[in-house]
Image: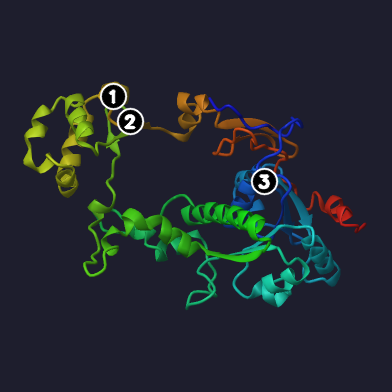
Amino acid sequence: MPSNPPVTFENSDAEPGPLAGFRVLDLTTMISGPMATCVLGDQGADVIKIEAPGIGDLVRRLGVPRDGITATFATTNRNKRSLVLDLKEEADLAAFRKLVTTADVVVQNFRPGVVERMGIGCDALREIKPDLIFVSISGFGENGPFSGKRVYDPVIQALSGLATIQGDRGMGRPKMMRLVIPDKITAMTAAQAITAALLARVRTGKGQHVRLSMLDAMISLAWPEGYAGHTFIGSEKDVPRNALAQDLVFETKDGFMTAGAVSDSEWHGLTRALDHPEWLDDDRFKTAGGRVSYAKERLDQTADVLKSRTTKDWMERLDAEQVPCAPILPLSEVIRHPQIIASDLLFETEHPVAGKIRQPRAAAIFEDTPTTLARPAPTHGQHTEEILAEIGIIR
């Protein structure tokens, strides 16, 4: 059980998080930017979400809302305050610039060139706040034939090779992930980069421009095993799909599970658990390399055996042999699994508009500076007057 479970916003006695005292101005929308700044907010930063009049962040409307708050927006925009500014209007633009003088970080994910045309690019803002960390998140970067294209997660899945890696082994058809993986890995990369830039500023006293594209983040994530056939120069090849990643979904008598054996000891344990010790005498499977080369044959015979018993039976037998395994569960069972409960991962709290909600705590557990849920995801413009008053603007 974590030593420091998250503190909900009903509790005002929380110790300050590791990023307490830093202010982040969040000009981003959708997932990559908001999720990155949510990580910073969970860790104690004062995150101000700056939204346009009208709809604001489109994610407020994507999905089935409860009283105007969607589940995705609630999870990726907690621990933020919402400020509505029309940056096309001179008065609001002046207010934003004044707010920048109080900030440590500005994060934006407009298409390349947009913030410069608006007069709020990195160079312009660092004239008024020289040590500012300015973060630009884009789809493809600032150069190249795709740099000006509109982008959503599936576009990055396509160009990064993720859809190819996920492709159906039998049909050879590329396949999209059903989660927005590129957006989220970009968010995690951005959060880490921002923290590193703040640490560098502590050492040097200087701000800097941090640039990050979704395409770069996704290819970097996929590279170690996904691009294994293109790492050694001079012997490049497209590795067959069945060697890129093994499909370890097995049907049992009453459901589905996964199990895998990489080391020799795990392979020996698997053969014992499945009551097939003769597999150890098969020359194809005597080494880890052989088990990869003949993965289809090995997995096919494993799948045939696993159909004969229930998931619970196999879990007990495989656990006894220390073979990595887990049940594949409906999401309604995942959130109630004993391991999830023991980890104190999920918590429930009352959103003032949407009512009772369930969310995961921040994944990292800090011993002395715990993460908190200081405030729920805001309504559109909820803190406008409060924030403007902090910089001496009364409306």
Number of numbered discs on residues: 3
Q: Is residue 148 above or below residue 370?
A: below
Q: Is residue 241 above or below residue 279?
A: below
Q: Few, some or many C-alpha atoms within 10 Å of disc 3 (few <14, some 14-19, many ≥20)?
A: some
Give the x, y percent position of residue 68.
70, 47
- Disc number placed over residue 310 in the picture, else none: 1
- Disc number placed over residue 301 in the picture, else none: none
> Distance between the Cα atoms at labels 3 and 1?
47 Å
> Distance between the Cα atoms at labels 3 and 2?
44 Å
- Residue that lies at the very extreme toward the front in this rendered image: 203
Q: Are marks 1 and 2 in contact (CB under 8 Å)?
A: yes
Give the x, y percent position of residue 43.
64, 43
Q: Secondary structure at mark 2?
A: loop
Tell me the residue that label 2 is attached to: 255
Q: Is residue 237 left or right of residue 83?
A: left
Tell me the residue that label 3 is attached to: 19
Give the x, y percent position of residue 366.
59, 36
Q: Is residue 247 above or below residue 25?
A: above
Residue 67 lies in what quarter of the image?
top right
Q: Is residue 272 left or right of residue 202?
A: left
Residue 239 lies in what quarter of the image?
bottom left
Q: Few, some or many C-alpha atoms within 10 Å of disc 2 (few <14, some 14-19, many ≥20)?
A: some
Residue 3 lies in what quarter of the image?
top right
Give the x, y percent position of residue 322.
28, 26
